[in-house]
Image (tube, grey):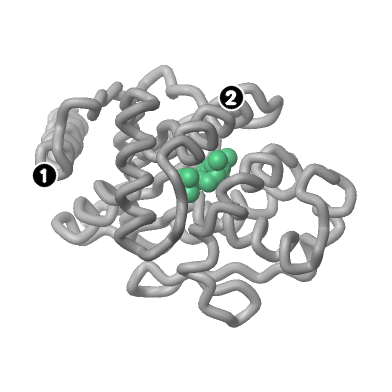
Amino acid sequence: MKKIAVAIDGPAAAGKSTVAKQVAEIKGYTYIDTGAMYRAFTLYCLNKGVDCQDHDACVKLIPEVNIELKPGHLVFLNGEDVSREIRLPNVSGNVSYIASYKEIRLALVELQRKMAETSSVIMDGRDIGTYVLPNADVKIFQIASVETRAIRRYDENISKGIPCTLEEIEEDVRKRDYIDSHRDFAPLKPAADSVLLDTSYLNVEQVVEKVIEIIDAKLAEEKDA
Ligand code: DC
């Protein structure tokens, strides 16, 4: 069977990972959460006491960092399960700085491309359709209003026992939107051949259904071509 690559890009808290996980399950693809990798790197810098706005100090840490994504959506940093810690507000507040450093991006993109070599994948991030997998079979750019995204992320954090306020989350989402879309290297932007999916007024099941429709239509098109 042909190996499929699906790219889902979009701003912070647009619901990409929730949807991608479910689509992966239904379609039998491997889900790759690239944001989790930038988060794990950020956690390493914070644990080391390195200022995430200090480019040179952060980039120096590249050889010390080993990030693995394991079954069950687990994220390991140097052999330790950090799946919960990488969602904490301090990581969310600093990750956009780390993700703006070209050297760190290149190291993580290499890992991401390797993961997509061996199986069908659905990969979510900011630059998957534009940079990581430019030949992906299907590219989706998933958006929602800032207010909707903040409420979704707030509810998610509370359900995971991560303390936060809605105001804090909304400010973080706005700040990350700005940094992610204004960085020089591989910024957040829709690929020219992506399908725009606004999820502001859709629930998770409806978005999953739409994504599967888009994938099936694209694959049918490719088959007929
Ligand atoms: O999807 P997320 O919120 O877990 O992503 C965390 C941060 O990582 C986000 O602010 C932008 C960055 N990121 C990126 O620059 N490129 C990716 N492919 C994935 C995430």
Identify which amino acid the numbered label 2 is placed on: Tyr
Residue 66 vs residue 43, the one in the foreground? 43
Residue highlighted by disc 2:
178
Q: Nearer the viewer, residue 129 or 166?
A: 166
Q: Looking at the picture, does residue 13 appear above or below residue 49?
A: above
Q: Quadrant of residue 64?
A: bottom right
Relative to the observer, which residue lies in front, 86 or 116?
Answer: 86
140 or 86: nearer the viewer: 86
Residue at x-position 17% and y-position 55%: 27
- Residue 219 visible to the viewer: no
- What's the amino acid at mark 1? Glu
Q: Secondary structure at mark 1?
A: helix
Relative horizontal placement of residue 95, taking residue 194 as reference (left or right): right
Residue 93 x %, y %: 61, 45
The residue at the point 32 percent across, 30 percent down is 142
Mark yes or no: residue 158 visible.
yes
* Left or right, 74 with reference to 6: right
Q: Residue furthest bottom?
A: 79
Q: Which residue is disc 1 drawn over?
A: 205
Number of labelled discs?
A: 2
| Residue 214 picture location, percent across and down | 17, 32
- The quadrant of the picture occupied by the N terminus is bottom left
| Sequence-first tag of 1 and 2 | 2
Q: Quadrant of residue 120?
A: bottom left
Residue 184 drawn at (x, y percent):
70, 25
Query: Where is residue 186 drawn, in percent x and y?
Result: 61, 31
